[in-house]
Image (spheres, helix red, strand yellow):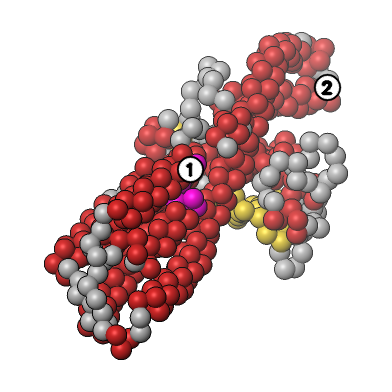
Amino acid sequence: MSAGLAAAGLPAAGLPAADGAANAKNMILLIQLRWIAVVGQIVTIAVVELVLGIALPLGPMSIVLGALVAHNLASVAWLRNRTDVGNNQLFMTLILDVAALTAQLYLSGGATNPFTSLYLLQVILGAVLLDSRLSWAVVAAACLSFVGLTQFYRPLAPHHQEFGDTITLHIAGMFVCFVLDAILLVVFVTRISRNLRERDARLAALKQHAAEEDHIVRMGLLASGAAHELGTPLASLAVILSDWRRMPKLAADPELAQEIQEMQAEVQRCKSIVTGILLSAGEARGEAPRVTTVNAFLDELVGEWRAARSATTLAYQNAFGADLAIVSDSALKQVLFSVLDNALEASPGWVRFAAGRNAGMLVLQVSDRGAGFPPEMLAQFGKPYQSSKGRPGGGLGLFLVVNVVRKLGGVASAANRPEGGATVTIELPLATLTIGGRRHAS
């Protein structure tokens, strides 16, 4: 599995982190199981000693019980400061449980004790929780302990005959042990399996995230290369248009002068897009980051978008409130342009762009009156190639929106409006947009 994660671009720490979180939950289950074992041993010792009248070495057996209790308390304290647990810790815990069971069986008849089948509980738990090598180590420890108990043990004293002969009592003990084994296995293996399923789900999410990150990197490299190639011809066009604008023949024609001015605006917009792509890829293009404010950034963004699209149907509502100094983010501007473009394509007659503040978050909403998102797209919002436009490469715009917003520490979501159309909501922490926050993030 680790090789598959590496192939997907997942960091090597991804698998241990997911395993560690699941192992921590499983360690808690083992601690709970040990508490049950302590209570069960106390009850069994009391029944054997007081009801059956069989003398037991209470002193040594109490020491073993005390050691189990101390180990449990130490394990609880150890887990408080940890979020992950390794396989070696689980293995040592199971080995200590095998050792404790062996000690109690040694003091109560050895291999003749019907509760020797409790070794199977530790073996099955080892098979579920550990890798193959450590699982076989638990098997070897349990088998060696059982073999040792056939030769070295403390015999039990005779019991009262009114409770039946030795064979009857042995069968009764085996039945009690069988029922106990069955119940504990069903309860704990079921819960352990649930923990393992949750771990697998986290691993699947990490693999998906890694695949998306790899896709973004490849697209970023392609976009960065294209931006570099476009820089030179755009600069040449800007120079040529500037020369044309100063030519007397062209300047004397108002219609041509107006067209040249519009062409210059479009070239300048293309250069801004190229600059934004390079800045998003971590490359400078000779233009330093610009300090602005939230309201100025939003007002300028809306003005540029309206001018570039000749859109008169955009309803702009700014309820951000008290202004805040930020660093102008070209990537965020391109993201919002993309969302507004999608909304305009879906609803040419009306698009609303609303800005607000919720605690420490900048909340941006783009709404339209189009057909809305199909349910399957809402379920896979932000995944690549999820689009209702039916053309190759569709869905990459929203995919990039979601991932750029996530890089900025925010969240992007979508929903259909009850009255028709859709709303895309972008929530960004203001701390990452401020001057100090951006310096810290970089």
Q: Residue furthest left?
A: 59
The residue beneath circle 1 is 131
Instruction: Tell me whether circle 1 and circle 2 mark residues in contact (CB < 8 Å).
Output: no
The dominant secondary structure in magenta is: helix
Report whether residue 305 is seen. yes
- Left or right, residue 48 beside residue 259: left
Region in magenta = 125-132
Q: Residue at x 44, y 58 (%)?
A: 120
**Quadrant of the rendered image containing residue 41:** bottom left
Q: Residue furthest bottom?
A: 162
> Helix, strand, or loop for circle 2?
helix
Q: Residue at x 37, y 42 (%)?
A: 88
> 373 or 59: nearer the eye?
59
Q: Is residue 334 above or below residue 65?
A: above
The earlier-in-sequence mark between 1 and 2 is: 1
The residue beneath circle 2 is 256
- Image quadrant in which the C terminus is located: top left
Q: Residue at x 26, y 79 (%)?
A: 159
Q: Amino acid at mark 1?
A: Asp
> 410 or 174: nearer the eye?
174
Q: Amino acid at mark 2?
A: Leu
> Helix, strand, or loop for circle 1?
loop
Callout 2: few (<14), some (14-19), or many (20+) C-alpha neighbours within 10 Å? some
- Left or right, residue 144 beside residue 269: left
